[in-house]
Image: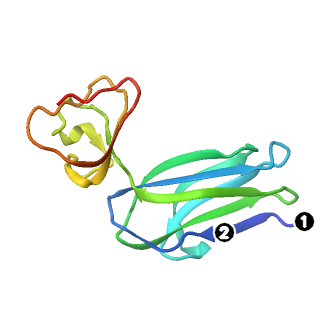
Amino acid sequence: NTSLAMNDWFFLPTMNFTAGTSYRLIFKYKTSGSSFPENLRVMYGTGADNLSMTNLIKNYPSIVNSTYTTDIIDFVAVGTGTFNIGFQGYSDANMNYIAIDDISVNVSPALWTGTNSTDWNDLGNWVNTLSTPNSNSIDVEIPNVTNKPVISSGTFAVKGLTLYTGTSLSI
């Protein structure tokens, strides 16, 4: 619009969040390019309206990419209940557009950090999980860090396992 600034929202369907659980939001975004910078804000709240959007997930000031960029954001739910995620386009008048595509929301995978040691069973070596991974319902990601994980005894099950380039898992 040549005379009105953009302040438009769209909302994802209602979903259930559990307080303290980490969720992963993935989506693609683009604009028409650097001549028409756009702004995007992603939030969540207890209803599908702008007044209910009380928790900022991420702010994107001055988007100028004309090809799709994929963003992966992990965020921790502040409460238990039903929530909506909202996308707000906010830009000056006389800009062009923001395109958003391929949106998904899932529980974040457990992420190995190796902060304390190489011990798989040490909860201090993990983020995005409330216990050491041992469930067919949890995905695990192991990036290339100094302390590589070691499972020295026991039986463990995970839903999916991603090993980043340069890393290993010793069993």
* Quadrant of res 112: top left
Q: CA distance from mark 2 to mark 1?
A: 19 Å
Q: Nearer the viewer, mark 2 or mark 1?
A: 2
Give the position of the N terminus as an image quadrant.
Answer: bottom right
Q: Secondary structure at mark 1?
A: loop
Please indicate whether residue 10 sits to the left or right of residue 90 in the image: left
* The label number, if any, that marks residue 18 in the structure image: none
Task: State the scheme by which the image is colored.
Answer: rainbow
Residue toward you, 1 or 139: 139
> Quadrant of the image for the C terminus?
top left
Q: Alpha-carbon neighbours of circle 1 within 10 Å: few (<14), some, or many (≥20)?
A: few
Using the image as rendered, state which of residue 57 and residue 147 is in the foreground.
147
Q: Is residue 33 above or below residue 114?
A: below
Mark 2 is on which residue type? Answer: Trp
- Reading the image, the residue beneath label 1 is 3
State the residue at coordinates (73%, 66%): 7
Q: Residue 12 placed where, x, y %?
A: 55, 69
Point out which mark residue 9 bears.
2
Q: Residue 14: x percent and y percent?
A: 48, 74
Give how far across and how far down residue 11 sits, in percent. Answer: 59, 70
